[in-house]
Image: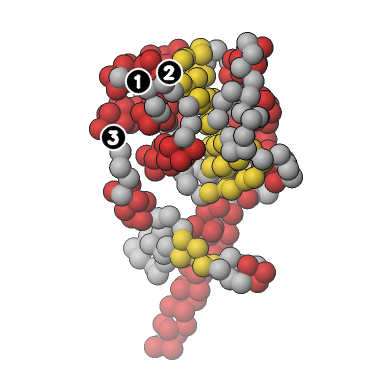
Amino acid sequence: MASSLVANRFAFVLLKTEKTVAKFHSFPLSERLRLRPCKFKTKNQFTTNCCVSSAHDEKYSNKQVISVTPPLYDYILRNVREPEILRQLREETAGMRGSQMQVSPDQAQLLAMLVQILGAQRCIEVGVYTGYSSLAIALVLPESGCLVACERDARSLEVAKKYYERAGVSHKVKIKHGLAADSLKALILNGEASSYDFAFVDAEKRMYQEYFELLLQLLLQIRVGGIIVIDNVLWHGKVADQMVNDAKTISIRNFNKNLMEDERVSISMVPIGDGMTICQKR
């Protein structure tokens, strides 16, 4: 009887394990890289407590990398220097439709630092939403600096304008309400090609290649160093999952591939937020 109970118990555990593994492998690749099976609890769950994973291919020497779990991300955010006005804007935006489009505080901090390192005077943002990233940039621009903010949604722009005024940076921001591609083309036609030194893109994903080409024309020609930062290049991990082939994912995948082959820029893809690629004009 005892041996029968043990055998039944073993069969039950084996079945649970098989179901767990099957569930794990049914997840998109991005989730499988992030999650690992946990010990059985009251429910068959997965945990994100493990922060370290390894590259599977031996050519990467099984390099260990950090996976950002919720506790670790909380730690990162506690180490972000977020100005009070940005915190207020972030919290107001959190209750709005589409709040997931807002960049994270660590992304905004990186953008501001890049602008400062570059000593940027003239910047462009393609896709403003409620203005969190553009406000972060405007705050660090010199008084003579200028940020062209391109956004098609009037309701979102009203929130952005309110915070530009509260922060005292309205004089640095030129809002372009309308389709971003049209706004960029208008800048070029207005003789502003080769006069900007920093751009941030966080707008319609299927337009990324066109935005990029237009922005390259607008970046300074007189010196090397103009920077374009592209958001959402990892697209929730979908770019690495060949089972996902919707239009936006394919567009970002193709854009990333084109950037890899583009000798006009130096690039660095960084896993911050939803993935950002920093491009420096050669």
**Residue 9: which quarter of the image?**
bottom left
Q: In whole angstroms, how far apart are the C-alphas of marks 2 and 3? A: 18 Å
Q: Report the Cα–Cα distance between label 3 and label 1.
A: 14 Å
**Callout 1 environment at 10 Å: few (<14), some (14 to 19), or many (20+)?**
many
| Residue drawn where x is 46% and y is 21% of the image | 146
* Amino acid of disc 3: Pro
The reply to whether residue 223 is visible in this rendering is yes
Contact check, label 2 and label 1, Cβ < 8 Å: yes
Residue 159, position in %: x, y? 36, 18
Query: Which quarter of the rendered picture does the N terminus lie within?
Result: bottom left
Residue 47: % across, % down: 40, 60
Between 38 and 44, the one lying in front of the other is 38
Q: Does the residue at mark 3 contact the one at mark 1 (Cβ under 8 Å)?
A: no
Left or right of 117 in this view: 265: right
Q: Secondary structure at mark 2?
A: strand
Give the mark nearer the N terminus: 3 vs 1: 3
For badge 1, the amino acid type reads Val
Judging by the rendered image, the residue that carries numbered circle 1 is: 169
Q: Is residue 168 above or below residue 65?
A: above
Residue bearing the label numbered 3: 83
Q: Please, what secondary structure does the residue beneath circle 1 have?
A: loop
Q: Give the residue at mark 2.
A: 173
Q: Few, some or many C-alpha atoms within 10 Å of disc 3 (few <14, some 14-19, many ≥20)? A: few
Q: Residue at x 59, y 38 (%)?
A: 225
